[in-house]
Structure formats: structure tokens, C-alpha cells
Image (tube, helix red, strand yellow):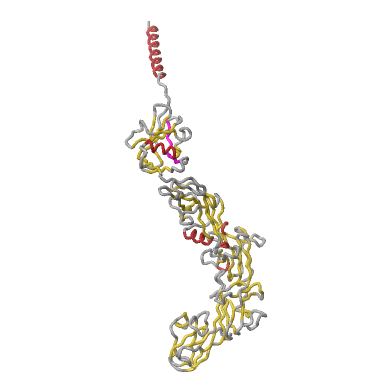
């Protein structure tokens, strides 16, 4: 009996379990829950203007990716509806890109025009958009918040057009040796419904989107030409003023009609500045290897074919050339072991102290050093054209100076007894040019001669007779100068003269263009009158380079 009862209970339990399994089997799981997601763009309340002259062009709608519980594939549909609609019966819809698999929808302007018409097709159409995500089950997820959108139809669209030059991913050289030649940005013509199109050129940093461009310029002919042409010199100035240094940038062109601004292509260009006055710093034992703006430098000119030059007093030891102050390999140049430059290279040897002409061409990776000693030569000088009368280098002034008796004739500056190294002045105006014209001397006298090579590629000179003038002199009318003579032993100009109580000044060349007064130990141009308080015979001295003077009653 007990066995019979147990068997009955077993049959009942099996029946219950079988019933449960059948119920589960009756429910087919077709998908899993979908996570929420947000719309990304266009932003809420954005306006899209349909370019009616380029209906095949596209506009992209994007949203965050949704996920399903067990990873089943999701299909997206973009929906458009009226501002008071609930997307249950949208005015327009379409699967997203890649047959609905991608979290973006690329719509043509023609499709946007259809949406515009479905939303009323007049003026500015207001509607909203959202995205439906589904994975084959009753589970459907909409974007968490729909975005409002406005669509307008351009009445004066702009056709597509292509950028031409500079080519995409090309190098654009702004070349100082071609300062007056043209550099042209060029593109094809665009058309509009009205026929009136103007253009603007945009340049921006690589990776930016032209929302805040580095430079915006109107095209030629008041914006109507499909090009923008400026000289190398003009581009050099414009780019520098807008912080555009050597490197990669993007450029595009905006075509503008009466109611639309249209940009299409974006080109990348590497802008390189060549043959401009950019310093190459010389750092070494002469300045304690201080790699900063206080280091001496050499520089090129627009006509030097990238050859940088400068004169520097160097100490025995070594130097390197740097184009910034980082010491990184790319900007540091030394000797490669064969007398050429390499990065970063070995120290460039300086065999002895001296005043060197330093040259370097970083495009050819060459350099040269020339130790120089300077003097004056010519029919006006003591040694005529046979040899230089030497000048002395003053390290404090960084100038070559000397008192020289010159005749009414001509002279030049020359170094190392060699005509390969000479400077004259084409305009006799204080500026020097390599191999320039002879410098005339109009009156024989003792002269203070100065050769200043301290500013690279901007070399200057001066040559002055000195005298005293004033009410304390034998001619109290301040008209006639009393000339001073060169004292080679003491390195000063001197005069012994009878003075009466009164005032006087030192001046050059019988004119007021260069005159000294003020403190005897720190004379200044146009300084106050000097004076003596009692009559007598005086010896006056003047060091016109260091601007010091003495007054001694004999």
C-alpha cells in the first residue's frame, strides 16, 4: 500500500513539472532590453539651410550608440515629426546608414528638402527629430530627448566648387628671396541662383574646424575673384601677424551668396618660411654656453640664398648653432666630423680667441668660420691702396675703432689684407655693403673712424672730424669750430686752446648733427652745454666712442 501511495505522488509531481515546462516553451524570447541613448547632433534648435544648388551634398545626423542586453543587433531609424507630434506617425523616416546598423544618418539636401516639404514647406519649417532603436522584439527604445530643428530653403544657393592650389598635403614656401613675387590660392568658380558669389579664404590650425579661424581674407577683386594673390612679402607679414608659424595648417574657401555661405573641400598645407631674417643663435665657450636670447646670432637676408652671417668675438673652445633655446636635436647643429653641419653634431672648434665671421646655410648644412682683423684702405688713408691701416677692436663697444689721419680722397674697410673681405658704402650714408662703393672724404684731417659689424647683415660705419665750438672759445659766436687732433698714445682727440668764462660743446664735422654735452664722464648727444668759470689756457680731450672728456687748465 505504501509503495502504491509513493508511486501516485511521483506521477503527480511529474505532471506538475511537465505543465510548467510547457508554459515556458510557449513564450518565445525574440530580443533583449535596449539601453537609453542621446542625440548628439545637430544640437537642439539648430537651423539647417538647404543649398538648392547642391542637392546631392549631404548633412549628417548623429547619436550615441545603444546596446541590447545580450548583444543582439540593433537597427536605427531616424524620425521627423511636427513640433507637437509624438513620432507615432512621423512625417518622414529613414533607416540609418549601413542599412540601419550605424548610429548616424547621412541625408542629402534633396532628402532634407522632402522633410522641409512634409513639415509645411513654407518659410522656416519647425519640427523635431528623434531616433528609434529596435532589435526585433517588442523592445523599442527612442532617444531620451528629441531635438527641435528648423529647416530653411535657400533662395540663392551656391554650387559645389573645387579647391585647386596649393595642392592638398603640399608644401607652401613663403620665400624671402622672392619677396615681390606672387603666391596664389586658387579655386574653381561657384555659381548661385542670382549669379552673384563672393569668396573668403580661411586658414586654421590642423585639427580645427574653422569656427574660430586663424586668418580670414577676402578674395581678389573685392571678393569676387576665384583666387587670392599676395606677394611672398605680404604673406610673410600677414601670417606672422596672425601667429601662423612654420607647420601644417588647413585651408578652405567660403562661397557666399545673398542668403548662404557654402564651404566644401578642406586642404592641408605645410607652410614653410625660407630666406627670411630668422636668427641662428651661436652658443659656446665665449658666452658660457648660455642658450638664450642674449646669445649672439647670425641671420640671412632675402638675397643671401639662406646663407646666414654675422660677426662675433669668440673665445678658444667650441660653439654650436641653435634655432631655438631647447637644445633638442632638431634645432641644434654641430660639426659632422667632415666640416659640415649635422644634428646635433660635435662642437664646432674655435682654435683661438678672435673676431670671427660666422656663416651657416641650414638648407645645405654648411658653415664657415673666418677670423678677421679690420682696417681702412684707400687713397685717403696713410698706406694708400697698398694695405690697411689697422683699427682696434673694442670689446665693450663691440666695434672696430681708431683715430686716422685721412686725406681728401676715398677709402674702404678691408680685412686680412684680402679684397675678398671688404665693405664700402653705395650711398655714403653710414650703411655698408660687401664690395660696395668707395667712401669719399671731403677734407683732410684727423678722423674718428668706427666700423660696426655687431648687427648681423646690417653693417654700419661712421667717420667724423671733431672740434669745440661755443661762447668760451676764441669765436664766441658759436659759428666756427676749433679742430681737435688725434693723440694716438692716449687714444683721444685733443686740443690746447685759450678759453674765457662761458660755455662750449664738442661737435663733429662743423655741424650740429653729432654733438656732445652734459656730464664729462657720460657725454650725450644734444647734451647740455659744458662750461669753464675762469679764463686761461686749457687742454681738452675727447674719447668720442666711450663718450668721455676732460678739461684741464694749464
Please tell me which residue is depicted at 34% across the width and 33% down the height of the picture. Answer: 86
Asked whether 206 or 408 is in front, the reply is 408
Viewer-side residue, 296 vs 157: 157
Residue shown at 62% from the left, 58% from the top = 342
Give the x, y percent position of residue 467.
Answer: 51, 86
- Rendered residue at 54%/60% (across/down): 232
- The location of residue 302, given as percent across then percent down, is 57, 64
Tell whether 18 sits left or right of 324.
left
Q: Is residue 264 above or below residue 90?
A: below
Q: Is residue 33 left or right of residue 366?
A: left
Image height check: is 427 above or below 38?
below
Q: Nearer the viewer, residue 436 or 16?
A: 436
In this picture, is 114 found above or below 214? above
**Residue 498 place in picture, x, y as percent:** 49, 93
Which residue is the extreme one toward the front? 194
398 sits to left or right of 97: right
Residue 62 is inside the magenta segment: yes
Asked if one can make out residue 399 in the rendered structure from this viewpoint, the answer is no
> Which residue lies most toward the top here?
1
Region in magenta: 58-68
Question: Closer to the camera, 170 or 69?
Answer: 170
Total labels: the figure holds 0
Most distant residue in the left direction: 84
Q: Position of residue 192 (x, y in %)?
A: 45, 47
Amino acid at each position: 500500500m505504501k509503495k502504491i501511495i509513493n508511486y501516485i505522488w511521483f506521477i503527480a509531481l511529474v505532471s506538475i513539472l511537465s505543465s510548467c515546462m510547457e508554459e515556458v516553451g510557449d513564450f518565445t524570447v525574440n530580443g533583449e532590453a535596449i539601453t537609453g541613448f542621446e542625440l548628439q547632433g545637430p544640437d537642439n534648435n539648430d537651423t539647417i539651410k538647404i543649398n538648392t544648388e547642391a542637392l546631392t551634398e549631404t548633412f549628417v545626423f548623429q547619436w550615441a550608440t545603444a546596446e541590447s542586453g545580450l548583444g543582439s543587433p540593433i537597427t536605427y531609424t531616424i524620425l521627423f515629426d511636427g513640433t507637437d507630434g509624438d513620432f507615432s506617425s512621423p512625417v518622414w523616416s529613414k533607416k540609418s546608414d549601413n542599412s540601419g546598423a550605424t548610429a548616424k544618418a547621412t541625408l542629402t539636401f534633396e532628402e532634407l528638402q522632402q522633410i522641409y516639404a512634409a513639415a509645411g514647406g513654407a518659410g522656416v519649417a519647425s519640427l523635431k527629430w528623434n531616433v528609434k532603436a529596435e532589435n526585433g522584439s517588442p523592445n523599442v527604445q527612442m532617444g531620451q530627448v528629441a531635438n527641435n530643428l528648423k529647416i530653411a530653403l535657400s533662395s540663392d544657393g551656391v554650387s559645389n566648387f573645387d579647391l585647386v592650389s596649393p595642392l592638398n598635403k603640399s608644401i607652401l614656401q613663403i620665400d624671402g628671396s622672392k619677396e615681390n613675387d606672387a603666391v596664389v590660392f586658387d579655386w574653381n568658380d561657384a555659381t548661385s541662383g542670382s549669379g552673384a558669389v563672393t569668396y573668403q579664404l580661411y586658414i586654421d590650425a590642423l585639427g580645427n574646424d574653422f569656427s574660430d579661424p586663424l586668418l580670414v581674407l577676402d578674395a581678389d577683386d573685392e571678393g569676387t575673384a576665384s583666387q587670392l594673390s599676395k606677394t611672398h612679402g605680404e604673406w610673410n607679414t600677414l601670417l606672422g601677424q596672425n601667429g601662423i608659424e612654420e607647420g601644417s595648417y588647413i585651408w578652405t574657401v567660403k562661397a557666399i551668396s545673398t542668403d548662404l555661405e557654402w564651404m566644401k573641400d578642406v586642404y592641408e598645407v605645410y607652410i614653410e618660411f625660407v630666406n627670411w631674417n630668422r636668427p641662428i643663435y651661436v652658443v659656446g665657450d665665449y658666452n658660457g654656453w648660455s642658450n638664450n636670447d642674449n646669445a649672439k646670432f647670425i641671420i640671412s637676408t632675402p638675397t643671401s640664398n639662406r646663407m646666414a652671417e654675422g660677426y662675433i668675438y669668440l673665445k678658444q673652445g667650441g660653439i654650436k648653432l641653435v634655432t631655438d633655446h631647447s637644445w633638442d636635436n632638431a634645432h641644434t647643429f654641430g660639426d659632422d666630423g667632415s666640416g659640415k653641419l649635422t644634428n646635433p653634431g660635435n662642437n664646432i672648434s674655435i682654435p683661438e680667441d678672435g673676431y670671427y665671421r660666422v656663416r651657416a646655410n641650414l638648407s645645405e648644412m654648411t658653415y664657415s668660420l673666418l677670423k678677421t682683423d679690420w682696417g681702412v684702405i684707400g687713397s685717403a688713408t696713410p698706406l694708400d691702396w697698398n694695405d690697411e691701416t689697422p683699427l682696434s677692436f673694442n670689446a665693450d663697444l663691440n666695434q672696430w675703432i681708431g683715430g686716422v689721419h685721412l686725406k681728401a680722397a676715398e677709402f674702404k674697410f678691408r680685412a686680412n689684407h684680402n679684397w675678398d673681405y671688404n665693405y664700402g658704402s653705395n650711398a655714403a650714408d653710414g650703411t655698408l655693403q660687401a664690395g660696395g662703393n668707395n667712401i669719399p672724404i671731403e677734407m683732410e684731417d684727423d678722423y674718428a673712424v668706427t666700423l660696426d659689424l655687431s648687427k648681423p647683415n646690417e653693417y654700419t660705419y661712421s667717420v667724423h672730424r671733431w672740434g669745440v665750438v661755443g661762447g668760451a672759445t676764441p669765436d664766441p659766436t658759436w659759428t666756427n669750430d676749433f679742430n681737435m687732433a688725434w693723440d694716438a698714445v692716449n687714444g683721444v682727440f685733443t686740443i690746447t686752446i685759450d678759453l674765457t668764462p662761458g660755455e662750449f660743446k664738442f661737435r663733429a664735422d662743423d655741424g650740429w648733427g653729432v654733438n656732445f654735452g652734459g656730464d664729462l664722464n657720460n657725454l650725450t648727444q644734444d647734451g647740455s652745454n659744458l662750461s669753464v668759470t675762469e679764463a686761461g689756457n686749457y687742454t681738452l680731450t675727447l674719447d668720442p666712442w666711450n663718450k668721455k672728456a676732460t678739461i684741464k687748465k694749464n
